[in-house]
Amino acid sequence: MTSDELGNALLAHARSAIADHFGLAEPSAPQHEALDRPGATFVTLTQNGQLRGCIGSIEAHRPLGRDVRENALAAAFRDPRFSPLAAREYGITRVEVSLLTPAVAMVFVDEADFMAKLRPGVDGIVFQYGRHRSTFLPQVWESLPDPNLFMQQLKRKAGLPPNFWHESVAIARYEVAKWKEPV
């Protein structure tokens, strides 16, 4: 089976989860052998090109099919940045699914060394310092192409000052395969 078949299955399962919540009928989502294996996804919802919700899993801890359905529901109804999706918004909401590779801890001696190893446009980043943690998918590079600004916003998202750095900072990177519903 091709990557497009997996992407179509993931998109259909995400949309179906939201439709089921509203009691709407959607065509049955196609099956794919990968849906039964552990996987980590992020589901991003947009309306007219603007973010409407985004929730996901950094680590694979449940079957991929269940992960994408749970993250679709969380993005639609539990993203704290937005009010829950209303049934009237369903038809204008577009779904994007990102399938994450396992995150790999980065080794660096200081912030300058980390920045030199950062791959803009490729890396999704998990930033952690103590209880502060945040992530940006690689797609965030599209709106924050400057590496310094990207990292400043990621630190803010973690609840830290934009120029924060400490020797105990831990950073991991991952990549994604992504699929988006047509407009």
Image: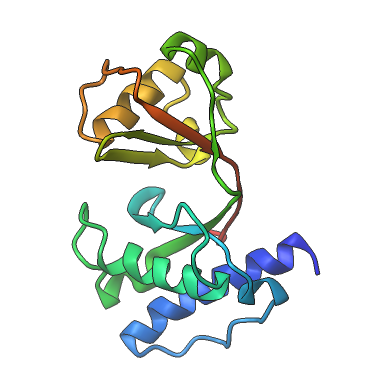
**Residue at x 30% of width, y 17% of height:** 165
Q: Can you tell which quarter of the image residue 179 is in?
A: bottom right
Q: Which residue is most to the front?
A: 168
**Residue at x 39% of width, y 53% of height:** 48
Q: Is residue 122 above or below residue 163?
A: below
Q: Can you tell which quarter of the image residue 163 is in?
A: top left
Report whether residue 45 is seen. no
Q: Which residue is most to the right?
A: 1
Q: Quadrant of the N terminus?
A: bottom right
Q: Is residue 78 above or below residue 16?
A: above
Q: 85 or 33: which is nearer to us?
A: 33
Q: Position of residue 109 (x, y in %)?
A: 48, 13
**In this rendering, would 4 be left or right of 70?**
right
Report whether residue 166 is seen. yes
**In this rendering, would 83 be left or right of 127?**
left
Q: Position of residue 95 (x, y in %)?
A: 47, 62
**Residue at x 64% of width, y 69% of height:** 8
Q: Is residue 177 above or below residue 10?
A: above
Q: Position of residue 6 (x, y in %)?
A: 68, 67
**Residue at x 47% of width, y 42% of height:** 137
